Image: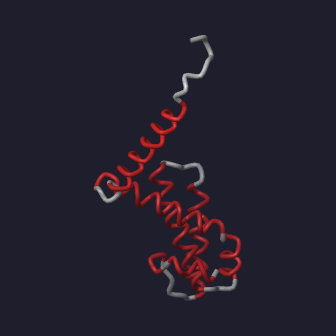
Amino acid sequence: MASGESTGNLHLNVLGVLVAVIICAGTLYSQREHIYFKEVFYVSRLKALQNRIYRKLKSIKQQAEKDDVDALITLSFYYASLKFVYLLDDNTLTLNQVDSDFLAIKQQIQVRGLNVDERDFKVEMLEGL
């Protein structure tokens, strides 16, 4: 066989890669409830939720300026969860900005005399914002 010629095993290589991907994905999926992966799975879901909120952040902030309770709850949750994830990731560069944004929302809630807490957040609130 001359150098550079195909060996004709491309289909076997592709099949091997697909089988490996399926086995790895299945293993990780079946282990997601294991104690070792529980925290990793939680943080990945939290980051996905933060991404959903971030995509609507401009609209949420506009609603919060109008003292919309759901928007204030959502922003409170968003900044509290960002702070949590940034501390886990040891991301101290933007932590000060998150703290100041979180404090501004807390002050707005306090000035308005509202009873709002980040623990009141429900994913369904995003639909109305």
When asked about the image quadrant of residue 74, the answer is bottom right
Q: Quadrant of the C terminus?
A: bottom right
Image coordinates for residue 120, horizontal then vertical, percent: 46, 81
- Which residue is more in the foreground, 33 or 100? 33
Numbered-mark total: 0
How did the renderer colour the structure?
secondary structure
In this image, 2 relative to 23: left or right? right
Q: Quadrant of the N terminus?
A: top right
When asked about the image quadrant of residue 58, the answer is bottom right
The residue drawn where x is 55% and y is 67% is: 79
The residue drawn where x is 56% and y is 55% is: 95
The residue drawn where x is 61% and y is 18% is: 5
Image coordinates for residue 6, horizontal then vertical, percent: 59, 22
Image coordinates for residue 66, horizontal then vertical, percent: 69, 85
Q: Is residue 36 above or below residue 124?
A: above
The residue drawn where x is 44% and y is 58% is: 43
Image coordinates for residue 30, horizontal then vertical, percent: 33, 56
- Which residue is more in the foreground, 19 or 109? 19
